[in-house]
Amino acid sequence: MYEVQLNGYAQIAEDIGYNPVTGLVLIYFEPFTDISDADVDHHVDSDYFSMNFFAHVLKVERNKELLPLLLERARQIYNVPTPPDSLNGCKDCQILDRVLSFIRN
């Protein structure tokens, strides 16, 4: 999911002189929610509560070919005089269609 974003950051880093970028890693945290009733008092006070988190490390492959292809596709879409047809069942597309019809009327 974050492959494009991290590869974009890597490209920016290389373009401003931080090269070569040799690896991409996403570090994200999720709250630890498996707390027994007996442990709740250790995490809650009258003024605050504390929450523990698990750190996850996800390696992402550096793919220098990915960004140019996506940027080219984005430019193609940008250059068309009207937006492409909506996808069936796409809720975001339906919302955009409603906004555009409101603007046009």
Image: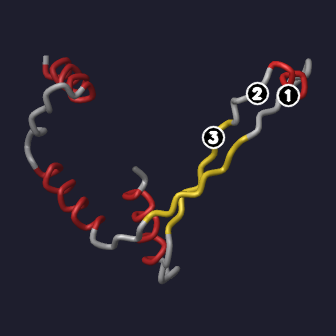
Sequence-first disc among 3 and 2: 3
Give the image location of residue 67, x and y in percent.
Answer: 30, 65
Q: Quadrant of residue 54?
A: top right
Distance from the alpha carbon under mark 3 to that under mark 1? 16 Å
Sequence-first disc among 3 and 1: 3
Q: Secondary structure at mark 3?
A: strand
Sequence-first disc among 2 and 1: 2
Say which of marks 3 and 2 sits in front.
2
Are the two marked residues, 2 and 1, in contact with CB atoms closer than 8 angstroms? yes
Q: List the residue tagged with mark 1.
A: 43
Q: List the residue tagged with mark 2.
A: 35
Distance from the alpha carbon under mark 2 to that under mark 1? 9 Å
**Relative to residue 64, is residue 32 depicted above or below?**
above
- Amino acid type, label 1: His
- Amino acid type, label 2: Ile
Q: List the residue tagged with mark 3.
A: 30
